[in-house]
Image: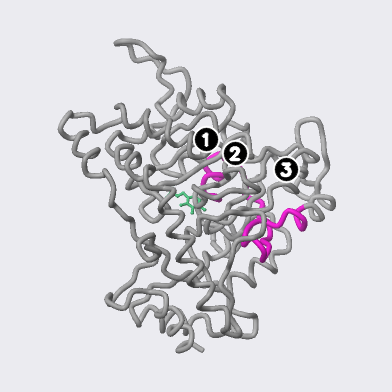
Amino acid sequence: MNELIIEKLRSVLPADRSFIALHEPYFQGREWDYVKECIDTGWVSSVGKYVDLFEQKLAEHTEVAHAVAVANGTAALHICLQLVGVEAGDEVLMPTLTFVATANAISYCGAIPHLVDSEERTLGLDPHKLADYLAEIAEVRADGSYNRVTGRRIKAVVPMHTFGHAVDLDPLLDLCARYRLELVEDAAESLGSFYKGKHTGGFGRISALSFNGNKVVTTGGGGAIVTNDPELAKRAKHLTTTAKVPHRWEFNHDAIGYNYRMPNLNAALGCAQLEQLDAYVEQKRALAERYREAFADLAGVQFFTEPEFSRSNYWLNAILLDEQQAHLRDSLLEATNSAGIMTRPFWTGMHKLPMFADCPRMDLSVAESLERRTINIPSSVFLGG
Ligand SMILES: *Cc1c(COP(=O)(O)O)cnc(C)c1O
């Protein structure tokens, strides 16, 4: 089996490389020009024209009214949660299968992650299973839903668009209305991905993006808060820039703010990257198509393709072993990495990490199965060129 899978991977990947990373950044545009301009003019830090330009271009790409650039995606999530009113002692629903940043950001608010199962169709949060679960445990009151078991308020839900595939948002939006939950999308992986024709990140009141080095486009490190609500956007900008009251020389602050600013240097890189986003997504989709064809006739393993309602950026490609083959996962990881083809398993479910082990959770059997069977395979933009 391992040999067959490596053969399939090799049929898609370039033959002239001894090592193929999982996801490399790609700089073929005007990155160097823009970054050099920052250095030449001295505008390298937290103000500068590229920050404004990056925010404007980002809002255009994601089809939302406002974008606020910040230091990283985790910081973006933290502020999104604070702005929708998540308070200490609240519970926040989130998938157990996600990068740890989602759960960390909830914890920064003093809130408690409440872990939700995934669905195989999207690899993201299962809104139907969540509906059945909430019917059992949640009681709707004027200021939100309450968990009958813990007595705590359930304030929000944070779906995550896994590997760039949109979760099924319509039934989730219904649930949010019924249970008075705020929807905050963790769209860190889904820049360039659409749900039923509309860009992800535009469904909740406020959403978070990431531009870490391994994401679809990168600013080195960075993130953004996107929203259609002008008041929330204003507060997001204020809180992430130390809550300073604007004045020509006085330093006054009117809240406990954060230094979550994105430096101009990073925004310059981001501006050049955004100019190439559409081309990147096309290349990533072309790569995914080649993988799909390569794996089409191999029994026991399936290349993961976008759900019918998603037009995905294919940020990270994934293959899923059948349950009967799941025991081969670790030997396959060993064999591919030894062969110079970087692969990795799904994230470890949050419920298995020591700091979140005691968090409330529903049945997580699908997530556990997906974790046992999923392997990410090389996904860099240039591989699709
Ligand atoms: C990348 C990522 C983030 C944010 O990560 P940063 O490194 O803080 O930018 C958040 N959630 C998910 C699911 C991610 O993949």
Q: Give the range drawn in magenta.
A: 102-130
Pointer 3 residue:
173
Q: Tell me, yes or no, whether the highlighted magenta stretch contains residue 104.
A: yes
Pointer 1 residue:
226
Q: Is residue 157 left or right of residue 78?
A: right
Q: Report, in whole angstroms, how far the alpha carbon at label 2 lies from the one at label 3.
A: 12 Å
> Is disc 3 in contact with disc 1, using a CB cutoff of under 8 Å?
no
Q: Report, in whole angstroms, how far the alpha carbon at label 2 lies from the one at label 1.
A: 8 Å
Q: Residue at x 31, y 35 (%)?
A: 263
Q: What residue type is labelled 3?
A: Leu
> Is disc 2 in contact with disc 3, using a CB cutoff of under 8 Å?
no
Q: Is residue 172 left or right of residue 86?
A: right
- As drawn, which residue projects farthest toward the left? 40
Q: Does the residue labelled 3 lie within 8 Å of ligand 1?
A: no
Pointer 2 residue:
202
Q: Report, in whole angstroms, how far the alpha carbon at label 3 lies from the one at label 1.
A: 18 Å
Earlier residue among tags 2 and 3: 3
Residue 165, compared with residue 141, is above or below; it is below
Mark linked to residue 15: none
* Quarter of the view holding residue 165: bottom right
Earlier residue among tags 2 and 1: 2
**Image colouring:** one colour
* Quarter of the view holding residue 63: top right
Q: Residue at x 35, y 62 (%)?
A: 382
Q: Residue at x 32, y 31 (%)?
A: 50
Residue 45, compared with residue 179, is above or below; it is above
Q: State the SS at label 3.
A: helix
